[in-house]
Amino acid sequence: MPAQDNFLIKVEGLVKSYGATSVLKGVGFSVARGEVHALLGGNGAGKSTMIRIITGAVHHDGGSISFRDADGQVRSEAEGRKGVTVVHQELALLPHLTVAENIVLPRYASGMSLFDRKRAFDQAFDALSIIDSDFARQSLHRLVGSLSLHEGQMVEIARALSSGAELILLDEPTANLTAAETERLFTVLRRLTRENGLSVVFVSHRMKEIRQIANVCTIIRDGRTVVDRQPIETLSDADIVEKMGQLSASLPVETVAKPRKRDGESLTIREEGLEMTLSPGTILGVAGAPAGPHTLIAALVGAARAKRWTVSMTGWPERFSSPRQAAHLGAGFITGDRWNKGVLHSLPIIDNVLASRRVVRGTRFAGTAERIECFDLLQALKVKAASLWDLPNTLSGGTQQKLLLARWLGVPSRLLVLEEPTRGVDIGTKKEIYQLIRDMAASGTIILWWSTENAELMEICDRVLAFDTEGRCAGIIDHDELSEDRLAELTGMAA
């Protein structure tokens, strides 16, 4: 254990409530200099609230936060927070500015600061090159709005690394990165903690990555600290899951799989050199870096401009003209970009849940029947909300993901396309999502599931369509032949 004066930050007895809802109930948490500290807990445990309090975005109701300098002297909270930066699970980039401008923006604290474009681009290049020098050379002048989600994640992390912070809080930083990009990020973090004394708080639900990067862990459960600064190697995955209060990661949700409804028309997907027919109830996995999967998904949900892919099913055109047409004809879609393209932040929970139904049915207002329907859906998904009229930002990220799933539960769908549907959710919620998707497949819905987690594809999919790093189709693997090595071979991405 580090000596007391080696702690960069120490949180003691932190308390926070929102009305009658108590979120933090005396949390304790401390981070030493030069360590990577895993902050673990299920969705809604209080991790994000504590992070917002540490950064000063939210005021706490009780407890204390103390910061120390390199000599062990206590700083004021205001001074200490200058050395803290956070990369949230949902990106906070300005789409109308370039990559370089987004990276250097925090350096210009005043609106009256003079902007030296050459110097700014040099600073941005140095920061982004730490993660990916090729991306830095190619993308500094691009508008952030043109980037993919995983490219935006790299820009956000580069901005944090360039800020000169002593403590970086990373909330699911690898959710949109490929395995190779993740390993590059980890290499950078290890070097900065070792050589610069940087401290990192790493929030993730991916056990493999936690063990790759973290030294110690703290586990929060129901607003309380249940494990305080324990070396990560002293805890098994089962120990961590149990202390988080989650379902065992080793236990299947169902002991007997429901028979799938196989009658009905199949869906045929074509591109040059490839034709694939999916029968009702099929779960098709999609693996690989975003370039290939994004092109296929855009075609299947009516968002494609290119004419690379075509579909064939009775009553469907070869290409949908819009997402609205796709939804009307029974093609549902759950985006992986929950924050920017999924959740309707200014609308209450009920409108978020009923959004797809209103597109399909052509309705606008929530009557009594819809309120009952929404309540039943939230009950089925184990979503706890004080009111159907609360805004979705009162819910944890994993619970917001359930709202997106709720949109398509019970809606007659011939195809449901899912982008990273378990991104940023805890193990218990992940297992619940798996079961929901299995149930939808059992009803005859064809499922297309893109994930960057190979283990996830192996668990739930009947077949996997793999794309290489250039976005080209590299092969189709049946479930019996699926393995981490085989997926890595076809996608060109480490397992």
Image: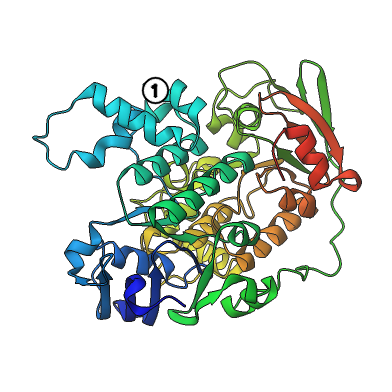
Q: Residue at x 43, y 52 (%)?
A: 195
Q: Nearer the viewer, residue 469 or 133?
A: 133
Tell me the quarter of the picture where residue 311 sits: top right
Q: Residue at x 70, y 73 (%)?
A: 248
Residue annotated with mark 1: 142
Mark 1, secondary structure of its residue: loop
Q: Nearer the viewer, residue 463 or 267?
A: 463
Tell me the quarter of the picture where residue 301 sits: top right
Tell me the quarter of the picture where residue 29 sits: bottom left
Colouring used for the render? rainbow
Q: Nearer the viewer, residue 61 or 208?
A: 208
Residue 98 placement (x, y as % from top left): 33, 27
Question: In the image, is 140 to the left or to the right of 37?
Answer: left
Viewer can see residue 280: no
Question: In the image, is 34 to the left or to the right of 451?
Answer: left
* Amino acid of disc 1: Arg
